[in-house]
Image: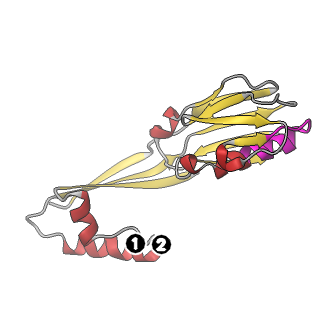
Amino acid sequence: MSLQTITINTSLSADGFKSVCDLAPGGLPAVVNLSNYFASVPDQQPALLTVNVGAVQASGTITSTGTAANNETMRLANVVITAKTSGAVAADGQFNISATPATQAASIAAAINAVPALSGVVTASAVAGVVTVTSVVPGIVGNAIECIDVNLANVTVVGMSGGSAGTTYTLDLR
């Protein structure tokens, strides 16, 4: 997926910027706030706007080829993901093992998506025994997200890669 990243360098502190341009509402209100901010930047307040167009999110895969064993693990962004024979608690990073690769992969993806510490870091989706883990933030930063197999049997983990910054354009608003 190709996304755009906007970086604003300003002399304002984070709280100062938020007081004049609250981006928290999301969607159209945030865009309006950003547009109003740019319209109000006085000549004496320097600001640089950097836009990365075509930034790509990093991704990795977890391929289930058979049944993992109880209490085997992998790590994703310093969160331990643990196989359980039954009764897995997804929010605790646990998934139920299964002899059916697609079922086990779906359980792994559900666990990744349920862990609060991974929210805003990665998302996961499963198709036919393969979990694709995708960095939420586009760019090269996603390539550094830890995604490793610790001791999972019948599961192959391929680390995060493919994130790129895209093309950078800088507007000097000084």
Q: Which mark is residue 30?
A: 1
- Report the residue that reaches farthest toward the right: 99
Q: Which residue is label 2 attached to?
A: 27
User: Which residues make up the magenta segment?
Assistant: 96-109
Type of residue at label 1?
A: Ala
Q: How many marks?
A: 2
Q: Residue 126: x and y, percent?
A: 76, 46
- Report the residue that reaches farthest toward the front: 87
Q: Residue 67: x and y, percent?
A: 87, 31
Marks 2/1: CA–CA distance: 6 Å
Type of residue at label 2?
A: Gly
Residue at left 44%, top 43%? Answer: 165
Q: Residue 115: x and y, percent?
A: 62, 48
Q: Residue 77: x and y, percent?
A: 55, 37
Q: Is residue 160 left or right of residue 73?
A: left
Q: Is residue 11 magenta?
A: no
Q: Is residue 121 left or right of residue 124?
A: left
Q: Is residue 100 magenta?
A: yes
100, above or below 158, in the image: below
Q: Secondary structure at mark 1?
A: helix
Picture quarter containing residue 21?
A: bottom left
Residue at left 77%, top 39%? Answer: 130
